[in-house]
């Protein structure tokens, strides 16, 4: 059982069946992380390289833990320590990495399409750990796994995604994923942060947070990047928080068993109130747990039976 | 040296001529154009053009030859060889060289170099402002005397509306056209492709059509205010076509060009992050593409110019956001324009007007017609010849062409410059 592809670059490229395959495998692999010896020998002797051009704590750690639990050797290259600061091109970095014969390269890069650029040039598999404003496929997969665990299904659910859609690769991947799996996705945010033609991705656009969360099974809040404030996207954090911050009163508008998600890191008190983030509807920490399982599944499916 | 080109279909849009004639070239000029058999063949080199179109030499009014300064991308020698291979006998080269061509000595250098090693006539376009910095006017009279044919800050739009007004007025003093690269840089921001349904999917920052349209509108209003000769470069949006159409109807002295990629490709070409599809203005939507074709057909757009913009792998073999804007077009421009003819969108005569007669008229340079006494610049075109675009075989020094591997129908098979054959298809 494997994915018939070398790379995982985006949810947009995946079929429904492939998404289901990854989620099913992740659900099984999750058990390994509950053992006292959290390790299986499946990927022994394989080398996994993580190449991060943007800062990240949880995604990178999640990939590394996932690889180690499958017994792969992991090597990390961070942007500050890498040749990028010396002006080496991405093509050269790729060629040098390839010369060391890794089996899998996990890349995060600020340029949309950078993982695709590498995947075309490298024999080894490439996993996109976030590229520019484009995609963050493993985040969407872990989000779908979390929802599936809570609701038992993805089909027919109402999912609200709220906040800075324009700059969010998490939103793009989740929009592709949830709509493919039969959920109904509604987005909301100030119009400055909802790109034109967003409707062509198959989502509904709600005029307010209240209307987006009405009757929702799932509410996903996006991080508002504080540096956007000086770029004319909205006026003040105070107004943003009042208009688009999720508070307890909004939960009454949603389904009784609504779950609250956030890809992290959170700005508590800005896009999400602490009472909601820590409340009984929150599955934010389950998302983190599922991140390891999903990444184990993806690595296994990409490398599993290939000697 | 005299050349007699027999039995070809002469197309000379400037004189509404479209019929089989024999064409005699003598002493670098068109000597005679007569029905078959009138001009004696004896003692003359005869070229049998049976089945071919005989057109006035094509003129590309918007190219980047990169010399001086970026000779690793293109030189006047390789760029004009690419022109000849594509059927062009004349090219107008934009001033964004290094240093910027904002003075008579660089204009003269370009012309000297063209004379020494060129395979086509080169018409330098001088900078609107010193260093194309958008701050102070360059010396227009001096540059005109040295051989500049127009002024433009192509690549760097003139953001200051007052400077643009003054440029139009100052150019009018010397009866020179101003070519506008219409783009609002604040609206473009850090966009890298057309803002539309593809950019939202790819997560690439968008350049809205409005970034072009607000500047086309501004410049059209300034042309009306000043009465100067305004030419809009590389029109890519439906809105820009509409603004120019209205302005022309209102009698504004404005002309406009578009490039083959705008009537051939859409933003879908960027899918897969192909940096050869990264160009400014960006490849637009299907709606815009169709509007550009309509503009070519109804006379709103006057010229097809390639915006030939050579870049090496150093600028193109990069992640999309980091790659340079621009693609090369001298060797595919005719073939792509003839696609419109084969598809019935425009007539053959219109195509030749767009590629030869009109650019000559806009820039007021010799050629663009086969009237006796004109320069002996002639392009022989095989309308039905199928060929595959192969960038490895290009005469250009660069390879950044999104049409590699395309099969096109119609090709220049011979290019004659001043009575000399500068390109001949070999097989």
Image (cartoon, coloured by chain):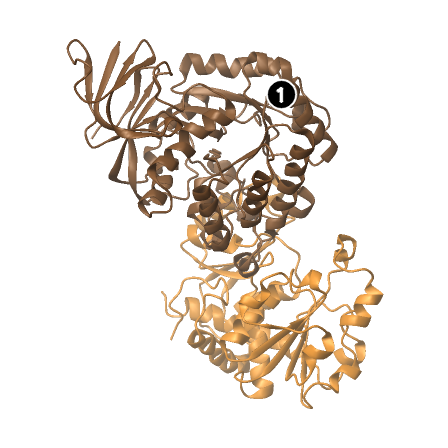
Chain colours: A orange, B brown
Query: In this view of the protein, which residue sits in the foreground, B53 or A173?
Result: B53
Which element carries disc 1, helix, strand or loop? loop
**B80 to A86, vertically: above or below:** above
The quadrant of the image that shows the N terminus of chain A is bottom left
Location of residue B191 with respect to A209 vertically, above or below: above
A223 with respect to A178 (left or right): right
The C terminus of chain A lies in quadrant: bottom left
Percent coordinates x, y for residue B36 in the rendering: 18, 22
**Residue B134 appearing in the image:** no
Q: Position of residue B301 (x, y in %)?
A: 49, 39
Residue B68 picture location, percent across and down: 53, 21
> Which residue shows up at 64% across the image and 22% down it?
B171
* Residue at mark 1: chain: B
Please identify the residue farthest to the bottom as the structure is shown.
A256
Q: Is residue A233 above or below residue B57?
A: below
Q: Is residue A102 visible?
A: yes
The one nearer the camera, B48 or B181, is B48
Instruction: Give the quadrant of residue A157.
Output: bottom right
According to the picture, the residue beneath numbered tag 1 turns out to be B102
Disc 1 crowd rating (10 Å Cα; few below 14, some 14-19, many 20+) is many
Depth check: A138 or A218 in front?
Answer: A218
Q: Residue pushed farthest left?
A: B42
What residue lies at 66% left-to-right and 42% top-to-bottom? B184
Front residue of B325/B257: it is B257
What is the x, y in percent for residue A168? 63, 63
**Residue at the location (58% across, 66% down)?**
A172
């Amino acid at each position: 059982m494997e994915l018939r592809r070398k790379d995982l670059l985006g949810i947009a490229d995946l079929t429904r069946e492939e998404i289901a395959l990854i989620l099913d495998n992740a659900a099984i692999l999750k058990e390994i992380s509950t053992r006292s010896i959290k390790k299986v020998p499946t990927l022994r002797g394989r080398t996994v390289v993580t190449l991060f051009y943007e800062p990240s704590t949880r995604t990178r750690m999640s990939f590394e833990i996932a690889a180690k639990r499958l017994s792969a050797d992991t090597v990390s290259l961070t942007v500050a320590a890498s040749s990028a600061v010396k002006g080496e091109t991405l093509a050269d970095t790729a060629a040098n990495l390839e010369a060391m014969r890794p089996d899998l390269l996990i890349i995060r890069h600020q340029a949309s399409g950078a993982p695709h650029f590498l995947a075309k040039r490298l024999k080894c598999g490439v996993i996109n750990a976030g590229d520019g404003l484009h995609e963050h496929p493993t985040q969407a997969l872990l989000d779908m796994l979390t929802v599936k665990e809570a609701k038992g299904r993805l089909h027919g659910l109402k999912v609200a995604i709220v906040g800075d859609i324009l700059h969010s690769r998490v939103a793009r991947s989740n929009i592709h994923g949830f709509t493919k799996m039969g959920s109904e996705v509604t987005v909301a945010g100030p119009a400055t942060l909802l790109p034109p033609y967003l409707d062509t991705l198959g989502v509904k656009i709600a005029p307010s947070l209240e209307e987006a969360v009405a009757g929702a099974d799932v509410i996903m809040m996006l991080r508002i990047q504080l540096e956007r404030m000086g770029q004319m996207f909205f006026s003040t954090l105070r107004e943003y928080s009042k208009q688009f911050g999720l508070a307890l009163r909004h939960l009454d508008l949603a389904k009784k068993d609504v779950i609250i998600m956030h890809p992290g890191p959170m700005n508590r008190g800005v896009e999400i109130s602490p009472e909601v983030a820590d409340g009984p509807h929150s599955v934010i920490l389950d998302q983190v747990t599922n991140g390891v399982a999903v990444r184990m599944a993806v690595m296994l499916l990409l490398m599993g039976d290939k000697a | 040296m005299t050349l007699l080109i027999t039995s070809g279909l002469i197309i000379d849009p400037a004189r509404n001529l479209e019929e089989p004639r024999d064409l005699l070239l003598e002493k670098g000029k068109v000597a005679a154009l007569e029905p078959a058999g009138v001009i004696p063949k004896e003692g003359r080199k005869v070229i049998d053009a049976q089945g071919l179109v005989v057109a006035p030499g094509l003129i590309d009014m918007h190219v980047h030859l990169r010399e001086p300064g970026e000779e690793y991308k293109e030189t006047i020698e390789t760029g004009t060889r690419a022109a000849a291979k594509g059927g062009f006998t004349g090219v107008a080269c934009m001033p964004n060289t290094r240093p910027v061509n904002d003075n008579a000595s660089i204009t003269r250098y370009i012309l000297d170099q063209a004379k020494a090693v060129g395979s086509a006539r080169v018409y330098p376009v001088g900078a609107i402002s010193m260093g194309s910095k958008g701050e102070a006017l360059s010396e227009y009279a001096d540059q005109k005397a040295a051989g500049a044919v127009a002024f433009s800050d192509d690549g760097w739009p003139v953001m200051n509306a007052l400077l643009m007004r003054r440029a139009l007025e100052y150019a009018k003093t010397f009866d020179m056209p101003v070519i506008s690269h219409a783009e609002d840089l604040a609206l473009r921001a850090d966009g890298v492709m057309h803002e539309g349904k593809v950019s939202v999917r790819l997560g690439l920052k968008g350049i809205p059509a409005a970034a072009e349209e607000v500047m086309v509108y501004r410049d059209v209003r300034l042309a009306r205010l000043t009465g100067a000769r305004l030419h809009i470069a590389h029109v890519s949006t439906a809105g820009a076509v509409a603004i120019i159409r209205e302005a022309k109807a209102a009698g504004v002295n404005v002309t406009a060009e578009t490039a083959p990629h705008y009537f051939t490709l859409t933003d879908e070409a960027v899918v897969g992050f192909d940096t050869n599809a990264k160009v400014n203005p960006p490849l637009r939507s299907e709606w815009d593409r169709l509007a550009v074709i309509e503009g070519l057909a109804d006379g709103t757009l006057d010229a097809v110019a390639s915006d030939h913009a050579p870049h090496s792998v150093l600028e193109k073999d990069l992640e999309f956001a980091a790659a340079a804007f621009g693609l090369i077009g001298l060797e595919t421009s005719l073939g792509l324009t003839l696609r419109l003819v084969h598809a019935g969108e425009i007539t053959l005569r219109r195509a030749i007007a767009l590629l030869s007669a009109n650019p000559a008229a806009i820039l007021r340079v010799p050629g663009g017609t086969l009237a006796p006494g004109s320069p002996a610049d002639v392009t022989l075109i095989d309308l039905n010849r199928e060929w595959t675009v192969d960038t490895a075989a290009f005469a250009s020094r660069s390879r950044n062409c999104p049409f590699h591997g395309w099969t096109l129908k119609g090709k220049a098979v011979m290019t004659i410059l001043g009575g000399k054959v500068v390109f001949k298809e070999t097989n």
